[in-house]
Amino acid sequence: MLFCNHSIRHLFSRIGLGTIFVVAGLAAGPSFAKTLTIGTISVSPVDEIETFQPFADYLKGKLASDGIDKVEVAIASNIPELAKKLVDGEIDLFIDSSVTAMVVNEMIGSRFLVRRWKKNRPQYRSVIFVSEDSPIQHIKDLKGEKIAFEEPFSTSGFMLPALTLRLEGLKLKALSSIRKKPDPNEIGYALAYDNETQIAWVERGLAAAAAMSEGDFEELSKTALKALRVIHLTPFVPYHVVVARPGLGAKLAERIVTVLKETHETEVGAAMLMEFEKTTKFDDIPENLMKNVIALFPYIDLLTTK
């Protein structure tokens, strides 16, 4: 299980789209810990902490007058671990993809705060591709075939394309091996754990298709051994978002939002953001992109099983 599934099909009947953006929905009150912890998911915690530390140091300076005397970085290795750290108050702010955040929000009641323009990009999408000489023309032609995804917590390499296939009415079934055969009315999928292996599986005919971010595909397809062809583009979603843990004080959350949205307006702040994985700025999450994320919500049961 990737996460606990509780009332997922009724969540958005209980809250409106606007509610997602309302920081005031967080627990109110002036009290909060003097240490603020920001985090994300990564299999390389040492490198990730080094990446996040200048950003943490910047927040410390900006939030000193708000009672924050220390900003730390904590890294989780997977979604369940992240959710636990948020619930336990070990992480206050979570920065990652919007689809991952949607899953975490459903698990524990955390909330979207703002969008992050990572790598100068406000949004991104995934592509589903096949070999140029493949007879497959449409994703519906993938029934009875195999698709190679990347890794379990990859938004562009697994969650976004998989949920999009579900949104299109297609059934997916996890395979224990890429060499297993799927049922005729299902699309079998296996995890390759890196983009190069995904492409190799398609080139060797082990998988009929694969999925990854549009940017990664454009780069890697240039050096692929066989010509590749895109058969489907997913909807755009916010590249990255900032999420607040449940129970974070409303006053502090509002102050953090203000600080983040103003960071790019100063020379020092803009320079720090560029060093922080080429972040352009933080801003409000556009309603049209949030609707794209919400459209995937009814199908996240796919992510509850391996």
Image (cartoon, rainbow, N blue to C red):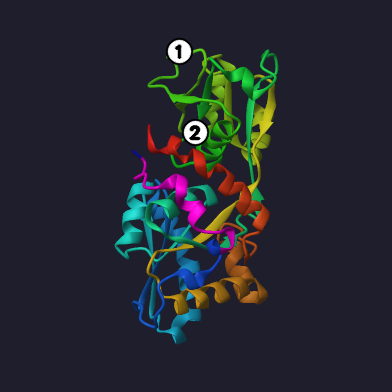
Q: In the rendered structure, which segment of residues is drawn in magenta?
A: 2-18
Q: Secondary structure at mark 2?
A: loop
Mark 1 and mark 2: span between their CA atoms? 19 Å
- Coordinates of residue 132 in the picture (x, y in percent): 70, 18
Quarter of the view holding residue 202: top right
The foreground one among 194 and 175 is 175
Q: Which residue is mark 2?
A: 150
Residue in view at x 68 percent, y 26 percent: 231
The residue sitting at the left extreme is: 88
Sequence order check: which comes first, mark 1 or mark 2? Answer: 2
- Amino acid type, residue under disc 2 in the picture: Glu
153 relative to 260 in the view: left or right: left
Assign the N terminus to one quadrant of the image.
top left
The answer to whether any part of residue 171 appears in the image is yes
Residue in view at x 47 percent, y 40 percent: 300
Is 160 within the magenta? Answer: no
Q: Which residue is mark 1?
A: 181
- Coordinates of residue 306 in the picture (x, y in percent): 38, 32
Q: Nearer the viewer, mark 1 or mark 2?
A: 1
